[in-house]
């Protein structure tokens, strides 16, 4: 599916399943692979959708698009380093209460204003999130079991920094990192997030990533959020996002 509405109207995809496909665009006699859903210069809402078993890219966002993704699943996409569940350039994107797992790569964002809130990014073969020339904001996410949890390459000395807030990076081969220019610290601002801190999940082996009763992440999230960010009303399970003195770390609130 190809959306190009010149930002005049909104397209809404709700309770849809995209499965076992890929997109191909023709331009000037040439063919280009693109997303199973490609959003080009458009405003799109994606809610309660499933993207699975895509050959190339599940969702491609480009050319000053505005996209909001809620309560959706992206899984089992791609088979090499150029394949991503979500691939965004030159756009505004918000991903809320969604799960991105078992893809070759999770999220790519370049020159994109991106907020990722209350999401699980799990067991992607290479990158959980890869960002370039932008400053994504990662709020109350749980990022586990990827080769690289979150990573950046910038080939200029102008630094772009991701903002990590109330999030958990655990058991990735590299939890956070950056290359080419500078050290890891030059690519990230960390606001009360767990980096290499055992969050004590209920059962990490079985991928039950709820916090156990003994977890150090309960009731310690910051509530005065920077950058105008807001927590959703509900966590990834649909339970109230705040129970107790403060929000918990990661995507699930302990009930």
Image (tube, rainbow, N blue to C red):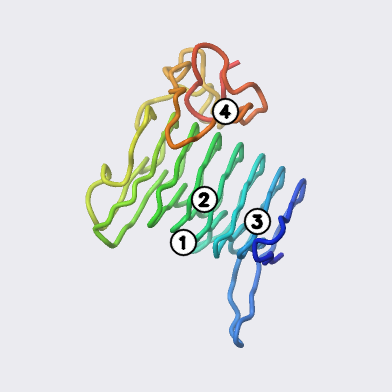
Quadrant location, the C terminus? top right
Residue 153 position in % (x across, y down): 33, 57
Badge 1 element: loop
Instruction: Pinpoint residue 1: horizontal percent, then vertical percent.
Output: 71, 64
- Residue under numbered circle 3: 43
- Which tag, 3 or 1, sits closer to the chain's start? 3
Nearer the observer: mark 2 or 1; the answer is 2
In the rendered image, residue 16, in percent from the top left (x then y), is placed at 76, 50
| Circle 4 Cα neighbour tier, 10 Å, few/some/many (<14 / 14–19 / ≥20) | few
Mark earlier in primary sequence (2, 3): 3
| First reached walking from the N terminus: tag 2 or tag 1 | 1
Q: CA distance from mark 1 to mark 4?
A: 28 Å
Mark sitting earlier along the chain (4/3): 3
Q: Are marks 1 and 4 in contact (CB under 8 Å)?
A: no
Task: Name the residue that disc number 2 marks.
Answer: 106
| Residue 18 horizontal side relative to residue 247, left or right | right
- The secondary structure type at the circle numbered 4 is strand
């Amino acid at each position: 599916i190809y959306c190009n509405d010149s930002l005049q109207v909104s397209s809404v995809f709700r309770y849809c399943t995209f499965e076992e496909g890929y997109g191909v665009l023709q331009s000037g006699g040439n063919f280009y692979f693109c997303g199973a859903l490609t959003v080009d210069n458009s405003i799109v809402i994606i809610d309660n959708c499933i993207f699975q078993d895509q050959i190339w890219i599940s969702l491609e966002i480009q050319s000053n698009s505005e996209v909001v993704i809620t309560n959706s699943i992206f899984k089992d996409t791609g088979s090499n380093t150029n394949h991503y569940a979500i691939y965004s350039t030159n756009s505004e994107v918000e991903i809320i209460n969604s799960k991105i797992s078992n893809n070759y790569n999770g999220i790519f964002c370049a020159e994109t204003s991106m907020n990722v809130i209350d999401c699980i990014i799990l067991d992607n073969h290479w990158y959980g999130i890869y960002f370039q020339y932008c400053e994504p904001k990662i709020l109350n996410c749980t990022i586990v079991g990827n080769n690289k949890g979150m990573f950046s390459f910038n080939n200029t000395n102008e630094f772009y920094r991701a903002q990590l807030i109330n999030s958990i990076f655990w058991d990735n081969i590299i939890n956070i990192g950056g290359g080419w220019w500078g050290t890891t610290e030059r690519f990230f601002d960390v606001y009360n997030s767990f980096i290499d801190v055992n969050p004590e999940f209920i059962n990490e082996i079985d991928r039950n990533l709820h916090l156990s009763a003994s977890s150090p992440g309960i009731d310690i999230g910051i509530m005065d959020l920077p950058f105008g960010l807001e927590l959703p009303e509900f966590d990834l399970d649909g339970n109230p996002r705040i129970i107790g003195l403060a929000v918990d770390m990661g995507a699930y609130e302990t009930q």
